[in-house]
Image (cartoon, coloured by chain):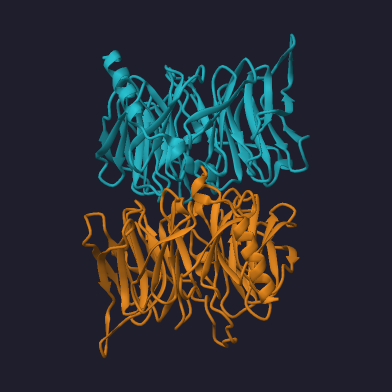
Chain colours: A orange, B cyan
Amino acid sequence: MKRLFTVLVAAMIAAAPALADEVRSTGALGIVIERAAGTVAVIDTRAHTRLATVEGLGDLSHASAVFSPDERYAYIFGRDGGLSKIDVLTGTLVNRVMQSGNSIGGAISDNGRLVAVANYEPGGVRVFDADTLAPVADIPATDIGNGKRSKVVGLADAPGRRFVFSLWDTGEIWIADFSAGPQPVVTRITDIGANPYDALITPDGRYYVAGLFGEDGLALVDLWHPEKGARRILDSYGRGEEPLPVYKMPHLEGWAVAGRHAFVPAVGRHEVLVIDMDTWTEAGRIPVHGQPVFVMAEPGGRHVWVNFAVPHNDTLQVLDTETLAIVETLTPGPGVLHMEFAPRGDQVWMSVRDGNEVQVRDTLTRKVIATLPADKPSGIFMTARAHRIGL
Amino acid sequence: MKRLFTVLVAAMIAAAPALADEVRSTGALGIVIERAAGTVAVIDTRAHTRLATVEGLGDLSHASAVFSPDERYAYIFGRDGGLSKIDVLTGTLVNRVMQSGNSIGGAISDNGRLVAVANYEPGGVRVFDADTLAPVADIPATDIGNGKRSKVVGLADAPGRRFVFSLWDTGEIWIADFSAGPQPVVTRITDIGANPYDALITPDGRYYVAGLFGEDGLALVDLWHPEKGARRILDSYGRGEEPLPVYKMPHLEGWAVAGRHAFVPAVGRHEVLVIDMDTWTEAGRIPVHGQPVFVMAEPGGRHVWVNFAVPHNDTLQVLDTETLAIVETLTPGPGVLHMEFAPRGDQVWMSVRDGNEVQVRDTLTRKVIATLPADKPSGIFMTARAHRIGL
């Protein structure tokens, strides 16, 4: 099967157009991470085709990506400290640096000039020139003794040439402001809570919210007022007094916002939480099929789509954000890892890892309208992300 | 001066790269309407250059544009009923139809397959295949006698292959749903108020709001619940009991949203109104320099930028959405007609019509970082609009 698959993919690639010879726009392109193979597929999300395969990207478990403002380049953040720059128009790897020993995600500045990477080892943030990948700045995290520094997680861009990130070991949130040049002004917010493990910026670009592994609740920073420090919200959010086994910590970047409500995955519980963003208090809980991993809003906000941790990761549920009812339960196949909506919402793409395929569904009918073979696909990233804050 | 300008532009165009011969992405491209000349400039918003000039587009007063999902094509809606399709990658006009005698704006469906145009004469909406511009559907507006039909205004796309628009003469809002195919299901909401003149869809894609010329207040339709009809909101919004002369009806599509507040131009008054979107009531008024035309939010929402009708149209004001204070007053030059923010907010572009230039400013410092000569520029449209609902 594996061999047949490889042959199929090879045939498909041979049939792909010679990308560089063709005039092609980039607005509907995207990439799919093929974790096991260390490759990235370049896709056309309107033609439902695979245009190219880029190889040699190292360890892509938990890999994520951001795009240059012109959508020409994708920056791939690997788990092994590799930072790779792909030209999505030509389907080629144009640059790659091993910038640390162990990293987790990155971000690109609002002006597209700086790419930042969050590192576990050595703990801190490294910032690179987006054109050349030459080092621009190094921001070591807080010293934790024995020559070690805190791991960094939850790195995101914010307006005004800023990057925001969390320090796992020391419970801090830092804001690095590059608006005055390559030497950042760093604002350090301490005592935010134990072991922040992931974070997000709300879609309006104003709030940074970090999840805490070491205690319940979330840490909230108002980026308009960093001088006010972090505020603890949602003390009920977390594993709670009788912790269930947590099969996978949910992804915070999947927060869905509809009107004043955010829909977020509960930790270790078969629930989606509803948060009132005006008061930052819990407004409800929706029982779901398993432990939610991503809770994603359809553009237009009427529904949220939820996937789950093992052993329920063959299933998706669609919730109505108004009635809070489950309107449909789908079983796309084994290992539904990630979803990505077309930016105006007519399609949703999803990785079915253990089915070795990517499914495209019509968001209205929720039926499959195309499938693309892929080698253990995980993250899907469309170029429209180039134009959104905090990804 | 005019001649010198023409020579300069001609020299600039001659120096432009042969677009079709070059691999180029589209994420940072845009177009500028040159109203008097009937031309459109294709711009690179990152290089701050003009790449091409497309001629022969007819009467471009009040022209607007939408983009295909892949950003390859711009559809230009002229005042004279012309619908033009431009290839922004090659800088060429690829198709043009005279689809009515008199039109005002258009929209593209969420799946990019249908382009709709709002017509004054004959009154109604015509819908075209986005690839070929072949007619797909004709939606005549309500008969008003003498062989005439109501003028249509405020046409916008909504999720689910829908178009929403308002009928000026008969006070209606219609929703045309193409999700089942080329014959739309049309929902007609009547008695919405006198003479709707423009409309918008809120950035979350849920609400359609029409301004009324014939009376005070606004008509609101919840697109999740069209069966509930239109609701009158903001009875204080309008020219009021002692009307001032209105030099230009403000553009509603410029509504800025920051948190639960929307910032909207008052009609005929030197004020920006603050609206609480939870209750749809007025939450405040901010005195400004003149009659506002566009009120635009910086991505990130901290500030809104306001331009004005004559005789104050050489000025911009920047307001803080939290303190409601005016933080800066700028005078870019004569005839500041339109602003467009880079999608993540680091730059703002503005047309200075009577200065024959487009200015690019750094949003943080508000200083000019580039200027481009342009022939009486008006609307500026960046390709990132391809990915937003309701434009």
Residue A337: image location, x then y, percent: 61, 70
State which quadrant residue A99 falls in: bottom left
- Report which quarter residue B189 is drawn in: top right
Res. B197 visible in picture: no
Q: Quadrant of residue A348?
A: bottom right
Residue B391 as seen in the image, left or right of residue B308: right
Quadrant of the image containing the N terminus of chain B: top left
A233 lies left or right of A370: left
Compare residues B339 and B142 and report the one nearer the observer: B339
Instruction: List the single residue furthest toward the top.
Output: B146
User: Which residue appears farthest toward the bottom when viewing the image?
Assistant: A146
Count of labels shown?
A: 0
Residue A16 image position (x, y, % from top left): 60, 54
Query: Please, is residue A131 above or below residue B256 in the view?
Result: below
Nearer-the-camera pick, A374 or A313: A374
Q: At 64% across and 70% down in the image, what residue appears?
A: A6
The structure residue drawn at horizontal position 64% and vertical position 31%, both measured from the top left corner, is B116
Instruction: Residue at 44%, 30% (x, y): give it.
Output: B266
From the viewer's perspective, is residue B305 above or below residue A2?
Answer: above
> Considering the image in quadrants, where does the C terminus of chain B appear?
top right
Query: How far from the left and from the top, in percent, is residue A175?
Result: 31, 65
Q: Position of residue B52 (x, y in %)?
A: 41, 30
At 26% from the left edge and 33% from the top edge, which residue is drawn? B330
Asked whether B31 or A214 is in front, the reply is: B31
Q: Is residue A219 visible?
A: yes
